[in-house]
Image (cartoon, rainbow, N blue to C red):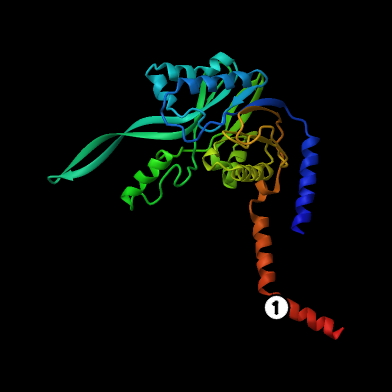
Amino acid sequence: LITLIGIILFISSKSTYENSQGETIEAALLQPNFSPWEKLFARDFGKLEDVISMYREGAKNSDIVIPCESILRDPVNVYYNFGDPFGIKAMNIGKELKKPIILTYPHRQTVLSNTTIIRNGKPLTIVQEITLYYNSAVFFDKNGNKITRYDKVHTVPFGEWTPFAEYIPYLRETINAIVGGDLTPGKEFMVIPVEIKPNVIVNIAPIICFEDLYPYITKILKKKKATLLVNMTNDGWANSIRSQWQHLIGAMYRSIETGLPMVRATNTGRTALILPYGKIISTIDDFKKGIMIAKIKLVSLETHFYKWGDIFFIIFLLVGNTLIFFYPLITSVFRKILFRA
């Protein structure tokens, strides 16, 4: 029964999508295939030039250029603010291309923290500078002007933050030595209006890495009037084709649930376009460098999941468990009926 319902919904969604009218845009998805274990903050101009060349190539046949997660592994904003050539070149990519772009890197921010202690019976306020890092995606318009910055909200435990660190003092240092340090979560999920072509504004919903695995996130973004889901990820650390495909399949369900198209720009794979009914279009092999030009029809389908959430899953779960629990009674009744017959 569940399989039959799924087939009917798939055919219905596919037909609705194919018969719907919508603006079509083209996005260049960059898959650089660099080592995820490259040194952080290396200020590698060779790597920067390679990244810029990919942006240039992608911009030739597209309306917007989208990179993988942290395509640059330096705090570009700090270099830029200090007038460093590395930061200036990175921040000016959009101005050269005359196309809207996204730039991904670890954003660094210094804030002041006030702590009050009691000393000699009197309160004493200690002011400290704290350095915060965010997993960020910065949006630029076609003139190279910064639109806004999205900071990843749902950070990954043991990869981007350390659970129980306050109870186990050495745990944070041990984890940070392996994966590079704690990241501060962003404050909110965002939908960012971007003028992709003249008079064509697309409400882009950025989701970084494993944020595409959580239905509650994409449901929030759909409610905020998103028209395109944009996932930027880096699964290269696992060195596994299977894990990259598993991540892709998980992302596919977010498109089906919300009825929104999704593009995925990844470091090592699997870069893809996912249509609102779940069809996956992918042209770059895993662990290969390349650029995919995704032709996206901007159509948003109405879905039962968006309207009702997990209610159907809960109903099937309750019915299934009830049948299992009462299975002996049900079989006993049927045997009596058949025996009497």
Q: Amino acid at mark 1?
A: Pro
Q: Quadrant of residue 173?
A: top left
Q: From the viewer's perspective, is residue 335 above or below residue 46?
A: below
Which residue position is annotated with label 1?
Answer: 328
Q: Quadrant of residue 126?
A: top left
- Between 174 and 59, the residue placed more toward the observer is 174
Taking the view exactly as shown, the residue that stands out farthest to the left is 120
Is the N terminus in the top left, top right, bottom left or bottom right quadrant? bottom right
- Between 37 and 72, the residue placed more toward the observer is 37
Q: From the viewer's perspective, is residue 249 above or below residue 196?
A: below
Res 206 visible: yes
Judge left or right: residue 131 versus residue 312.
left
Q: From the viewer's perspective, is residue 11 above or below residue 196?
A: below
Judge left or right: residue 160 versus residue 67.
left
Which residue is depicted at the point 64% across and 59% down? 314
Q: Position of residue 74 (x, y in %)?
A: 43, 27
Which residue is depicted at the point 42% across and 20% down? 80
Which residue is depicted at the point 38% across and 34% down? 132
- Between 1 and 125, the residue placed more toward the observer is 1
Is the C terminus in the top left, top right, bottom left or bottom right quadrant? bottom right
- Between 23 and 256, the residue placed more toward the observer is 256
Q: Secondary structure at mark 1?
A: helix
Q: Position of residue 137 (x, y in %)?
A: 51, 30
Res 144 visible: no
Q: Position of residue 70 (x, y in %)?
A: 50, 31
Q: Position of residue 280 (x, y in %)?
A: 70, 39
Which residue is depicted at the point 50% across and 43% down? 154
The local crowd at label 1, few if under 14, some if 14 to 19, many if 20 or more residues have their Cα within 10 Å, is few
